[in-house]
Image (spheres, grey):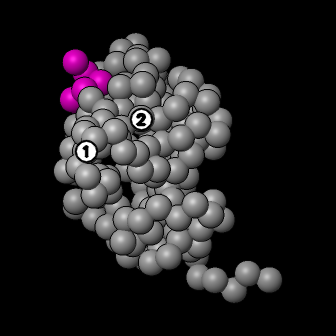
Amino acid sequence: MNTEQTLAAVHRTVTVRATPEKAFTVFTASFASWWPTGYHVNPNGYETAFIEPRVGGRWYERGPDGSECDWGRVLEWDPPRRLKLTWQLDSEYAFDPDPDHASEVDVTFTEEEPGLTRVDLVHCRFEGLAGGQSVADTVGGESGWTAILPHYVEAAAA
């Protein structure tokens, strides 16, 4: 029986001036166009980041020297409706290769009206992650998804 405390999920919702297809594509294929360059884990610096477009695909960044650091994996790939990723970074932002320790980022794209899409992001399952409460506090805080998603909204509207 699991006796671990369940940590509260982080919920963020934004509305983008884009169709669900474009909103999904900007979130995934154009991920590096909106992800803040200061939010990286590669000790060699940040050049770009990727979400591979398939279940099992990598979510990772690449430094200017070509070195790569994984962030997680794609759990669900259902364009243009849903994307689910593992977040395998602990409270020290070190990659943990064990998916049982991962939190999850679940993103849904819902058309509100033509050309307007609601994007719901839920970051959850922090319990198995080393320093899970700290990670939940960080991604749920002012410098977490709240600070990151406006960059996405701007990119999706472009």
Against 57, residue 38 (above or below) is below
Residue at the outermost top position:
114
Residue 96 coordinates in the image, percent (x, y): 53, 64
- Depth check: give the residue in front, 92 or 109: 92
Q: Position of residue 9 (x, y in %)?
A: 48, 63
Q: Is residue 8 above or below residue 70?
A: below
Q: Would residue 135 appear left or right of 9 to someone viewing this image?
A: left
The boundaries of the magenta stretch are: 152-158
Q: Per the image, is 154 magenta?
A: yes
Residue type at the position of mark 2: Phe
Which quadrant of the structure image shows residue 4? bottom right
Whether residue 44 appears in this view of the structure is yes
User: Residue 63's mark?
Assistant: none
Tell me the kind of residue under disc 1. Answer: Tyr
Q: Point out residue 140 in the picture as x, y percentages from the top left corner.
A: 34, 63
Image quadrant containing the C terminus: top left
Which residue corresponds to the image point at 48% horizontal and 42% vertical from the top-left? 59
Q: Which residue is mark 1?
A: 46
Q: How many marks?
A: 2
- Distance of label 1 from label 2 (alpha carbons): 12 Å
Residue 125 shows in the view: no
Q: In terms of secondary structure, where does tag 2 sit?
A: strand
The image quarter containing residue 93 is bottom left
In this orientation, which residue lies closer to the viewer: 127 or 72? 72
| The disc label shown at residue 50, or none | 2
Q: Residue at x 52, y 32 (%)?
A: 52
